[in-house]
């Protein structure tokens, strides 16, 4: 129940407070459920039947992940809805503030937004017990977003280069709103924050954020967007 | 490739035109895809997180069915999108004309509408080859709609009996629009109509419709609605 003493920057003890694990799983579970809803709804904006099917397949994969996390919570004697409850507000606010105006915005959100969240969850997951860590890494594996979105967004920019500027701004807004909501969560969920801060020292925390931002910049470049 | 002579009302030959099989599978596939979209979108109207998860689970099940039918079409050397194409118009029109105004309407539509379609597909499926028939019966198996919807609708009527009249009217409108679109499909897709008419004589066709209407009446009664 106590965080271990960090003996090395790379090797941290994996004994973490139960509440932090429940919080992390609850947050990811609700994130997957809202991702499902969002992708399934955005599928209606798809310009072709092929695109619609691709987005629907991603949505269905997110729901499978949601179910896996729910079952893991039940297996730990935790009610999944109770675990998700604290994160409904911040995630609902995030999605309300970043409703895509069209198909391309929804693609960029699905890719850029979900990838940053996944990178962040993965960074924390290293401090979970073996079972929880394996589950988190498994459900966060790419569900086909990357290749599909990169192809569609690059294709749209090739046809009309002007959209690149608009989508770059859109991605910046997504990152800004995500950080706002993350800060809100950090203030309210001490255990979860402890999981991150417990990584070691401020330098270690900074290293995590740096690596997340680096991966984000690479994804933006892959999309043909400036970050 | 020719329809067999019916020797008995219950025993019909299962040799049907390839085009009819492709049509039926294509129609069911697009039906499942739109059911997925509709349920996932309606999940946003759910009054509780439990309800939202239940509807999302049904939606994910519909997508699994869609994938099974798509794979079966590919296995027969048919492009699923081409097979679905003729049914996009009628199914889109049906859903546009029957957009639920609230959560209860969406539940009644998910249950009453999908059940009638499923009964109809099942009736035709008896004339397909073994593989196609087994697949159709499998994907049309209840995905948990029934118990969930009956529970929620009866609960809502218990709290406010007035909603029963509104929902009964709504169900009647759903059936009417479904028949309109089915007639449109029947006019345009000869092979598919042949599958139904090939059942034998008009009496046999009438018997199918009677049994579908009987099952509908029973479902309405289970919901606590007059039909």
Image (spheres, coloured by chain):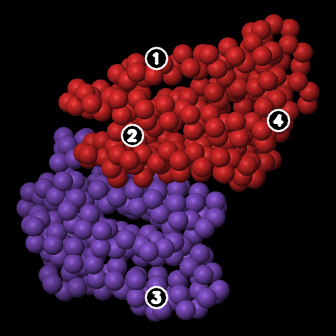
Chain colours: A red, B purple
Chain identifier of the residue bearing label 1 in the image: A
Numbered badge on residue A48: none
Disc nearer the start of the sequence (2/1):
2
- Do the residues indicated by labels 3 and 4 lie within the same chain of the protein? no
Tell me the residue at 27%/42% (across/down): A50
Q: Residue at x 34, y 43 (%)?
A: A103
Q: Quadrant of residue B98?
A: bottom left
Q: Position of residue A51 (x, y in %)?
A: 30, 42
Tell me the distance, in whole angstroms, between the alpha carbons under discs 2 and 4: 34 Å
Callout 3 touching callout 2 (CB < 8 Å): no
- The mark found on residue A191 in the picture is 4
Q: Which residue is mark 3?
A: B166
In this rendering, the answer to whether A84 lies above or below A222 is: below
Residue linked to disc 2: A105
**Which of the two discs, 2 and 4, labels the residue nearer the N terminus?**
2
Tell me: A45 left or right of A61.
left
Numbered disc 3: secondary structure: helix
A203 above or below B123? Answer: above
B214 left or right of B96? right
Name the element at disc 2: helix
């Amino acid at each position: 129940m106590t965080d271990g003493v960090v003996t090395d920057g790379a090797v941290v003890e994996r004994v973490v407070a139960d509440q932090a694990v429940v919080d992390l799983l609850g947050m990811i579970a609700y994130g997957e459920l809202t991702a499902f809803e969002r992708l399934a709804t955005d599928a209606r904006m798809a310009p072709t039947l092929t695109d619609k099917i691709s987005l629907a397949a991603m949505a269905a994969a997110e729901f499978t992940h949601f179910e896996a996390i729910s079952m893991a919570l039940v297996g730990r004697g935790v009610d999944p809805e109770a675990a998700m409850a604290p994160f409904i507000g911040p995630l609902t606010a995030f999605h309300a503030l970043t409703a895509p105006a069209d198909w391309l915005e929804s693609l960029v959100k699905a890719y850029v937004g979900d990838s940053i969240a996944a990178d962040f969850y993965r960074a924390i997951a290293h401090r979970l017990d073996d079972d929880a860590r394996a589950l988190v890494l498994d459900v966060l594996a790419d569900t086909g977003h990357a290749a599909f979105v990169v192809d569609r967004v690059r294709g749209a920019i090739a046809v009309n280069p002007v959209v690149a500027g608009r989508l770059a701004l859109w991605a910046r807004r997504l990152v800004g709103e995500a950080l706002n909501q993350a800060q809100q969560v950090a203030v309210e969920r001490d255990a979860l924050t402890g999981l991150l801060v417990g990584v070691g020292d401020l330098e270690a925390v900074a290293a995590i954020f740096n690596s997340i931002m680096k991966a984000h910049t690479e994804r933006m470049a892959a999309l043909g967007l400036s970050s």
